[in-house]
Image: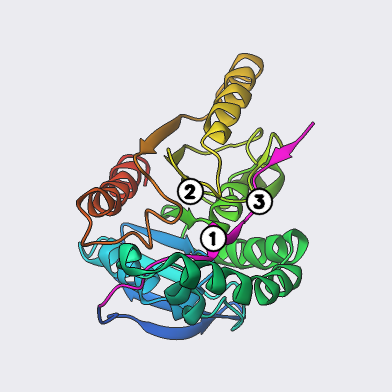
């Protein structure tokens, strides 16, 4: 039976980072896309599928800027929510940067206040709709990208599931008589709503996962389920792609995007998860 992790209140928590994004928002394949980096001769293209805060959260753009800083990559951060992300006030209210300063009363009042609107948002962005928007965009991107140029996909939280799904056999497209994956490498960090085996069994490209040991929204047990699924697939299928798993402690949900940079452990998780992305794409793109 397929099992999945659900997006709980942990998904709508997070701290908001300071910074001035360097890219621009443009229209591409029917979506608003934050674009930054090498537009003329990139080594590869990196596409990001964000958490539920989308383009509205500065963190997501700042991370895109970091990926582009070397000058090797063109980085795309599409608005897969089409102008309907979860609002920033939700993130700021439910988990401020200094969580210790927030009273228990304020914390649970924030949760009770925001859960109804979040549940309505989830209904507007169900699996079928989200899958179609993401895959349609990636099909257009793959067809428009020169055949020698590779594409990497990195997904966070909500976007982690759909990032992984771009690498499935069922998502491949035919180009010049040859079936090709939509992407060439994937990194999925604290991926929520991941369904095992459906979302991971038929991966065709190298994929790196990042898990939080104390992530209440994405159970750490999901890591073991994915590993078991892939161990079985490796025995049954020749040429199964390389998979890696990294663990972060404490790794509260959103550690790769919305961690507190003033907390030493959370800063380390932010920095190490960024290194994970760089190392994987350096190897495979």
Q: How many marks?
A: 3
**Near-viewer residue (163 or 266):** 266
Res. 39 visible in picture:
no
Report the Cα–Cα distance between label 1 and label 3. Answer: 9 Å
Element type where label 2 sits in the image: loop
- Extreme residue toward the top, this view: 235
Q: Which residues are magenta?
A: 1-18
Q: Is residue 250 magenta?
A: no
Earlier sequence position, callout 2 versus callout 1: 1
* Residue located 72% across and 64% down the image: 132
**Near-viewer residue (201 or 42):** 201
* Residue located 38% across and 35% down the image: 246
Report the Cα–Cα distance between label 2 and label 1. Answer: 10 Å
Q: Residues within 10 Å of mark 3 (few under 14, many from 20)?
A: some
Q: Position of residue 89 (x, y in %)?
A: 48, 81
Secondary structure mostly seen in magenta is loop
**Near-viewer residue (4 or 280):** 4
| Front disc: 2 or 1 | 1
Q: Which residue is mark 2?
A: 190
Q: Residue 135, located in which quarter of the rendered image? A: bottom right
Report the Cα–Cα distance between label 2 and label 3. Answer: 12 Å
Q: Which mark is residue 6?
A: 3
Res. 276 visible in picture:
yes
Q: Position of residue 82 (x, y in %)?
A: 62, 80
Earlier sequence position, callout 1 versus callout 3: 3
**Near-viewer residue (260 or 156):** 260
| Front disc: 2 or 3 | 3
Q: Is residue 3 magenta?
A: yes
Q: Which residue is mark 1?
A: 11
């Amino acid at each position: 039976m397929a099992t999945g992790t659900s997006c709980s209140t942990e998904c709508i928590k997070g701290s908001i980072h300071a910074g001035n994004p360097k890219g621009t928002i443009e229209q591409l394949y029917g979506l608003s896309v934050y674009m930054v980096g090498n537009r003329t001769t990139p080594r590869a293209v990196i596409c990001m599928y964000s958490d539920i805060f989308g383009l509205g959260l500065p963190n997501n753009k700042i991370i895109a800027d970091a990926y582009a800083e070397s000058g090797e990559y063109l980085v795309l951060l599409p608005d897969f929510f089409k102008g309907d992300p979860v609002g920033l006030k939700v993130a700021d209210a439910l988990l401020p940067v200094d969580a210790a300063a927030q009273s228990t009363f304020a914390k649970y009042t924030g949760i009770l206040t925001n859960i109804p609107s979040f549940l309505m948002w989830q209904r507007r962005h169900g699996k079928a709709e989200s899958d179609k928007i993401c895959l349609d965009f990636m099909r257009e991107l793959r067809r428009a990208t020169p055949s020698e140029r590779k594409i990497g996909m990195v997904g966070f939280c909500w976007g982690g599931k759909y990032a992984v799904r771009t690498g499935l056999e069922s998502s491949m497209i035919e180009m010049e008589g040859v079936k090709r994956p939509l992407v060439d490498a994937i990194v999925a960090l604290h991926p929520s709503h991941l369904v095992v085996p459906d979302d991971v069994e038929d991966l065709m490209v190298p994929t790196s996962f990042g898990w939080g040991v104390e992530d209440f929204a994405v159970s750490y047990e999901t890591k073991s389920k994915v590993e078991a699924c892939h161990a079985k697939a490796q025995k049954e299928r020749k040429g199964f792609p390389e998979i890696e798993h990294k663990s972060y402690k404490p790794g509260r949900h959103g550690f790769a995007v919305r961690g507190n940079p003033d907390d030493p452990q959370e800063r380390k998780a932010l920095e190490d998860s960024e290194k994970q992305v760089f190392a994987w794409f350096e190897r495979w793109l």
